[in-house]
Amino acid sequence: MGSVEISDITREFTRDDGLTVMAIGGVSLSIADDEFVSFVGPSGCGKTTLLRIIAGLDQATSGTVLVDGNTISGPSPKVGMVFQEYSLFPWRNILDNVAFGPEMRGISKEERYALARRYISLVGLDQFEKSYPYELSGGMRQRVAIARALANDPDLLLMDEPFGALDAQTRNKMQSELLEIWDRSKKTILFVTHSVDEAVFLSDRIVVMSPRPGRIRAVVDVPIQRPRDRTASEFGKLRRDVLGLIEEQSRQAND
Amino acid sequence: MGSNTSSGKRSPVWLVISLTAAIIFWQIIADYVVRNKFILPSFTDTLEALFDLWAGGTILIDIWTSLMHFAIGLLLALAIGVPIGICIGWFERVNRLLDPLIEIIRPIPPLAWIPFAIVWFGLTDFSAGFVIFIGSVFPILINTYEGFRSVPRVFVEAGRMLGCTSSLCLIRYIALPAALPHLAAGFRIASGVAWMCLVAAEMFGVSRFGLGQKIWWYYNLHQMDSVLVYMLLLGFIGLFIDYLFRYGIDHSLLRWRVGEVN
């Protein structure tokens, strides 16, 4: 479960001065079950907007998104999201944060706590279930955010630069952990990032987008076996290729 | 950095020194400079008046009556201010509809409502409560509104992604807890304003008891030492109420905020 069918998505924004700006200009893409797909591209290429449309948080001006054959018209518990900003509810402790989704589905207290504990332990934070978000480091908070999204058992997990605010070391560690979680819980993951290195390390496929209006420039397969070695030559070559594609975009955009 | 060594708990020594000095100063000015009990009763005069009032007066009934007025006004303000604040903070249309009315009524000083309070509710406890309500409803309403306006968008979106999609659900589970620090601040401001309105409301004779009523009463009897006793009572009880709210709220409802502040 978790296939995504994006057909001909466009998104226009009306600015305050009345001009319309095309943020996404016709994007189509098919994503298979359990695939890990990253979106990279210079800022303004609409990758976050595209993710928000798939999440149902934003409406496309035209075009459709199907998740497992169902049209997305608003947020659905089948689609989970991890945000770039820290999105944990500061007034709830870790256990109650992770149990939020099940609580909304009307699951009894005992059951949802059992469920939440399972996901908290999946991200390795068992001893912190009674802590409040402010007591946790940035990396730990994003782990909880992942656990919270997973606790609803979505078929599709959307991640909008989830590790963008973390330091390099924590970031690498989180990437490996995310792959482990993905391996164990098997779902489709769409991952927006600024880091080509991160995209090459994580993804089955990398979607390179170009700005103004946002379009798909290229879709790059990553045929490297996991676990991937960042220092391997094929890793480096792929990273160079993708970076080349992005730089070409930014140069054209700046001309 | 000497002051940091005793951080956490401030030494009560300074409190004692400061109070003692003030009392001695007061006594000297009253006894040797003013020398008129009517203009400025001394500390010992006031203390004596307190003992007399305690023995033969109505202090406890006055405190009780005033607290009742205070509670009527503040509870009414909560019951009306919070829901309206939520509605104008969450629903843009309700905001546009009610905002002009609120902005017109808000600048009217609460005490200007006293004639209507008396016409509508007579010389009753509720009449005093109503004036206090007018004074305290706006800080509660405005702070609730501000709190709802400043709920971070990411919390609402995270809630929606996790299955909390209706307005009612988002208000109850996301916006209200996120806005609680604002609500608490509004409630504290409101309780201060309420305490001020209380004196004026009671001075107009809405009841036979009350701290504000007694201030006016003893003024008419020219017993300024008793007036001072009631003034100090108002101060101390106000301080106590504020302390109670602050610590009650910070230590239970807003425990999660401890780390957010720094």
Image (tube, coloured by chain):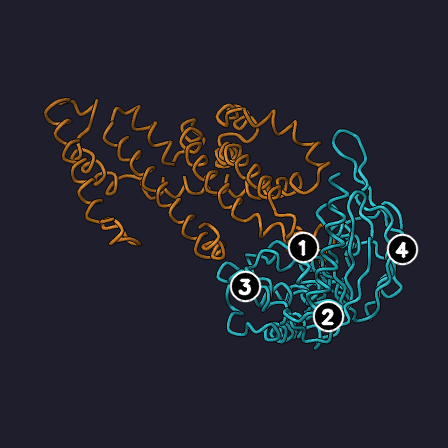
Chain colours: A cyan, B orange
User: Could you give the CA–CA distance between mark 2 and mark 4, rounded to whole angstroms?
Assistant: 25 Å
Same subunit, labels 4 and 1: the answer reads: yes
Confirm whether residue B245 shows in the render: yes
The subunit carrying tag 2 is A
The quarter holding residue A254 reads top right
Q: Amino acid at mark 2?
A: Asp
Q: Amino acid at mark 3?
A: Asn
* Disc nearest the viewer among 4 and 3: 4
* Label annotation for residue A7: 4
Q: How far across and how far down the image is residue A43, in percent?
A: 70, 47
User: Could you give the CA–CA distance between mark 4 and mark 1, rounded to whole angstroms?
Assistant: 24 Å
Same subunit, labels 4 and 3: the answer reads: yes
* Disc nearest the viewer among 4 and 1: 1
Same subunit, labels 1 and 3: the answer reads: yes
Residue B157, placed above or below residue A135: above
- Classed neighbour count for the residue bearing mark 1: other residues with Cα under 10 Å, few (<14), some (14–19), many (≥20): some
Q: Amino acid at mark 4?
A: Ser
In the rendered image, which quarter contains the N terminus of chain A? bottom right
Q: Earlier in the sequence, mark 2 or mark 1?
A: 2
Q: Disc 3 marks which residue? A: A93
Q: Earlier in the sequence, mark 1 or mark 3?
A: 3
* Label annotation for residue A153: 2
| Nearest to the observer: residue A208 or residue A94 | A208
Contact, mark 1 vs mark 3 (Cβ under 8 Å): no
Q: Amino acid at mark 1?
A: His
